[in-house]
Amino acid sequence: MDVPVDLVLRSTRVVTPEGTRAAAVAVAGGTIAAVLPYDSEIPAAARLEDVGDRVVLPGLVDTHVHVNDPGRTEWEGFWTATRAAAAGGITTLLDMPLNSLPPTTTVGHLRVKQDVARPKAHVDVGFWGGALPDNVKDLRPLHDAGVFGFKCFLSPSGVDEFPPLDQDRLATSLAEITGFDGLMIVHAEDPHHLAAAPQKSSGRYADFLASRPRDAENTAIGNLIAQARRLDARVHVLHLSSADALPLIADARREGVRITVETCPHFLTLTAEEVPDGATEFKCCPPIRESANQDALWAGLADGTIDCIVSDHSPSTADLKTPDFSTAWGGISSLQLGLPAVWTEARRRGHSIDDVARWMSTAPAALAGLERKGAIAAGRDADFAVLEPDETFTVDPARLQHRNRVTAYAGRTLYGVVTSTWLRGERVADRGNPAEPSGRLLERNK
């Protein structure tokens, strides 16, 4: 039996796979039933939500979020992280396997994480598994239990319970994952290059930048490409910072290597030149680099070498952001701000809102295999972000929803106000104010 249309969301600017156009989006039982002409007759039983000329985008999909719950919930938890996501137009997020205790490295640990997340999720939540030196036997069971892929580090992660893989163990884990055509997502910095770089106890950003050189990324990505080529493995480069690696990635793709790559809002909107000394809210690993490097990252997005933009939301308590870059926790909190930050810079550079939707919704959904997400099209979940693209606001940390309101964007004026966020046809945030939790836990291929 067909489910009757219960909602029509109408706008003069709806971002569809065919482009932005005036449309009426008919929703039935939480699913998009049809994308109709703007002036279509509204079914008698349906509620009409007309948002005028605000832009309706597919709900954003953020595949790189550190929620840290349970175990380090004082850093971030599912309640606060998913509220921030909803306020920022994100309707689906995937949680990284580390910084929580326990990490998501066994099926038992996954179940603990799911039990904690289930009653707290304001948006849909899925999980990455972790690949460690000693858990190869756990990879297939985790895959069968529904994780979306496996994260590994090639250099120290910053937490003792999540050690990195050397090249031999990377090969072993990749071979196992390739056996069931899984996906390995990789923090790609070479530990030997990091060890050889100058390490100073310092509040100067220039000293920190020198401690995380581009060569560390470039070498690690080159090694990853070699392993993926040999094994025909599916690999994904996390949080690309060094634009020098883009030709390596483009060449590998032309050869048929199955490699994708993401970058993050902070690499696209913040530059090393503007980071004040002691301002460790700007610290992340790999680091924010120079403006010329940022220009090259935007070129990589424009030509398709970079697939998607995701947050790498990696918060901590404020006391861990010491004024010494060598000891401060590395991570930038941007769940609620990623869309306006990226849109502000994208519009300045001549990119369209369709580009932003592709980079921040369609492409990350495709990366994770989330076939019901990432597009305003019949048969997809009725997930929407409604944006006032020409309205500006100044970032006030006190108005952010994530737990510890430290942000590198404080005081910046951004374009793009998310006026509402919709999950399966229900409004889950209104002008930054989230509703009660209604998110679901997602599993791969379900």
Image (cartoon, rainbow, N blue to C red):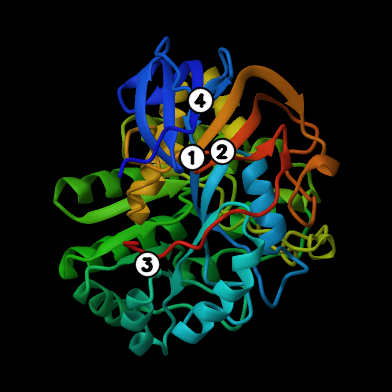
Q: Which residue is mark 4?
A: 9
Question: Considering only order in the chain, which callout, 3 or 1, is on the residue closer to the N terminus?
Answer: 3
Disc 3 secondary structure class: loop
Q: Position of residue 352 (x, y in %)?
A: 45, 20
Q: Position of residue 55 (x, y in %)?
A: 53, 21
In this view of the protein, which residue sits in the foreground, 204 or 336? 336
Question: Considering only order in the chain, which callout, 1 or 2, is on the residue closer to the N terminus?
Answer: 1
Q: Quadrant of the C terminus?
A: bottom left
Looking at the picture, which amino acid does disc 1 mark? Asp
Question: Considering only order in the chain, which callout, 4 or 1, is on the residue closer to the N terminus?
Answer: 4
- Residue 434: image quadrant is top right
Q: Which residue is mark 2?
A: 422
Mark 2 touching mark 1, by CB under 8 A? yes
Left or right of residue 365: residue 257: left
Looking at the picture, which amino acid does disc 4 mark? Leu
Q: Residue at x 59, y 75 (%)?
A: 115
Mark 1 touching mark 3, by CB under 8 A? no
Q: CA distance from mark 4 to mark 2?
A: 10 Å
Left or right of residue 417: residue 396: right
Mark 3 touching mark 4, by CB under 8 A? no
Mark 4 touching mark 2, by CB under 8 A? yes
Disc 1 secondary structure class: loop
Which class describes the residues within 10 Å of circle 4: few (<14), some (14-19), or many (20+)? many
Give the foreground label among 3 and 2.
2
Q: Residue at x 70, y 51 (%)?
A: 436
Q: Which residue is mark 1?
A: 383
Q: Position of residue 63 (x, y in %)?
A: 47, 54
Q: Which residue is mark 3?
A: 149
